[in-house]
Amino acid sequence: MQLEEMQRQVRVEATAGSASTSLANQLEEKRLGILSRLKVFHDLQRIYMPGSMRAIAEEDEIYRRNDMPPQPAELIKLWLPSDLDPQDRPIGCIAGLAEMEAKLREAQCHEALDNIHDRLHSKKHLIDRRNNCNLHSPMGPPGVYVNSG
């Protein structure tokens, strides 16, 4: 999941399209970081998800056969259990791994919703405070003309 987040961030930065050389170098460093983590991830996949290695090899073969350049690090498919065909999951990964991924994704959704809820709650309080301060200001509420004489 951390690797997916890194890929997502680099995709956003890459589409921003800044022309700065230093930003391009930073982007390339991040891509190299993703590739090194991807190598470690593939080593783990060999143990826990041998079926994914076949899918990765088939994808690589398609790129080689068609003389296509390799994909940027942020676009490389990770081949998680949910990416495998449902009929390949029982033999493609250890038992229960797909269910663990589903639970982890559900927890991510709950965390994201909690973050959104907290931000909306904070924003509501700021707006309420702003509105309350405007009502009690010496100038009166906004949009109301106060005649002092």
Image (tube, grey):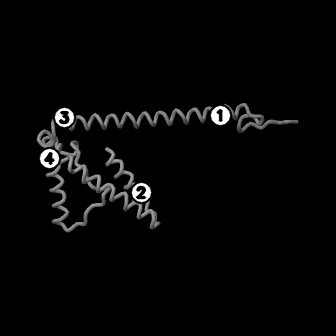
Residue type, mark 4 in image = Gly
Dot placed on the residue nearer the N-terminal end, 2 or 3? 2
Residue type, mark 2 in image = Glu
Q: Quadrant of residue 71?
A: bottom left
Mark carried by residue 13: 2
Q: Residues within 10 Å of mark 2 (few under 14, many from 20)?
A: some
Q: Residues within 10 Å of mark 4 (few under 14, many from 20)?
A: many
User: At 66% from the left edge and 31% from the top edge, which residue is drawn?
Assistant: 132
Dot placed on the residue nearer the N-terminal end, 1 or 2? 2
**Local secondary structure at mark 4:** helix
Quickly name the residue at label 4: 51
Image location of residue 20, percent across then percent down: 47, 66
Image location of residue 92, percent across then percent down: 14, 43
Residue type, mark 3 in image = Gly
**Local secondary structure at mark 3:** loop
The label nearer to you, 1 versus 4, is 4
**Local secondary structure at mark 1:** helix
User: At 16% from the left edge and 41% from the top edge, which residue is drawn?
Assistant: 93
Image location of residue 104, percent across then percent down: 30, 36
Q: State the separation of the CA atoms marked 2 and 4.
A: 32 Å
Dot placed on the residue nearer the N-terminal end, 1 or 4? 4
Q: State the separation of the CA atoms marked 1 and 2.
A: 37 Å
Q: Residues within 10 Å of mark 3 (few under 14, many from 20)?
A: few
Q: Quadrant of residue 147?
A: top right
Dot placed on the residue nearer the N-terminal end, 2 or 4? 2
Mark carried by residue 96: 3
Q: State the separation of the CA atoms marked 3 and 4.
A: 14 Å
The label nearer to you, 3 versus 1, is 3
The label nearer to you, 1 versus 2, is 2
Mark carried by residue 131: 1
Q: State the separation of the CA atoms marked 2 and 3.
A: 35 Å
